[in-house]
């Protein structure tokens, strides 16, 4: 099948992304790795009016250690997480989960942000976030930023 028609934009800043999301609401979808979105478009399970490509937003990329906190950008791919010495040292559970994510092609394009946003209970990252990692997800554009703690009821 083919995806339905939609408009496409690649904003240069988070501010632009938030403005577009506010203006278009449910009619907009974010595109990063596209490993879940593109198949849903092609099967016509999703029909956005606007596709917002966030791959150029550098603030959402990278993996870095800041004191005792490991910050993983929403655009970090599964492969980057699996190959990161920082992740292997500080969050080995994530490094060990990566080989169980689909196959190499998916791991090269799929992103942490996409995996967490989709919240598939069978996916590796949501389960890791619920493990005793103390994971926190920053939800924006809230003022002040909303920090979501991953909590599981036992």
Image: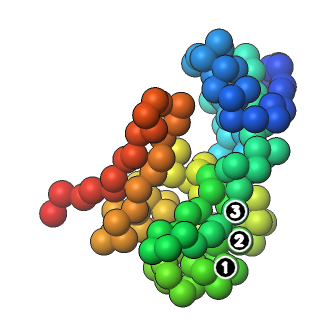
Cα separation, mark 2 vs mark 3, equals: 9 Å
Q: Is residue 35 above or below residue 51?
A: below
Q: Are marks 2 and 1 in contact (CB under 8 Å)?
A: yes
User: What residue is rendered at 34% in x and 56% in y?
Assistant: 150
Task: First in sequence, mark 1 or 3: give its number.
Answer: 3
Relative placement, left or right, of 120 versus 39 is left
Cα separation, mark 1 vs mark 3, equals: 10 Å
Q: Is residue 120 above or below residue 131?
A: above
Residue designated by label 2: 80
Q: Is residue 79 above or below residue 129?
A: below
Residue designated by label 3: 62
- Residue 3 appears in the picture as rendered: no
Q: Is residue 42 above or below residue 55?
A: above
Across and down, in percent, residue 127 comes to: 40, 64
Across and down, in percent, residue 96 comes to: 53, 82
Under circle 2, the secondary element is helix
Residue designated by label 1: 84
Residue 100: give its label: none
Relative placement, left or right, of 119 versus 76 is left
User: What residue is rendered at 69% in x and 35% in y?
Assistant: 14
Across and down, in percent, residue 18 comes to: 64, 26
């Amino acid at each position: 099948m083919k995806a339905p028609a939609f408009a496409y934009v690649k904003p240069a800043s988070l501010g632009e992304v938030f403005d577009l999301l506010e203006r278009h609401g449910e009619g907009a979808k974010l595109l990063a790795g596209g490993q879940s979105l593109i198949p849903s478009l092609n099967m016509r399970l999703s029909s956005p009016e606007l596709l917002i490509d966030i791959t150029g937003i550098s603030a959402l990329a990278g993996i870095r250690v800041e004191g005792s906190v490991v910050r993983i950008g929403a655009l970090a791919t599964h492969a980057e997480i699996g190959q990161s010495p920082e992740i292997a040292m500080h969050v080995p559970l994530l490094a060990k989960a990566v080989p169980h994510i689909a196959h190499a092609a998916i791991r090269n394009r799929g992103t942490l942000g996409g995996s967490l946003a989709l919240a598939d209970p069978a996916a590796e990252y949501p389960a890791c976030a619920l493990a005793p990692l103390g994971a926190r997800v920053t939800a924006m554009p809230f003022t002040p930023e909303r920090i979501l703690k991953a909590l599981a009821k036992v």
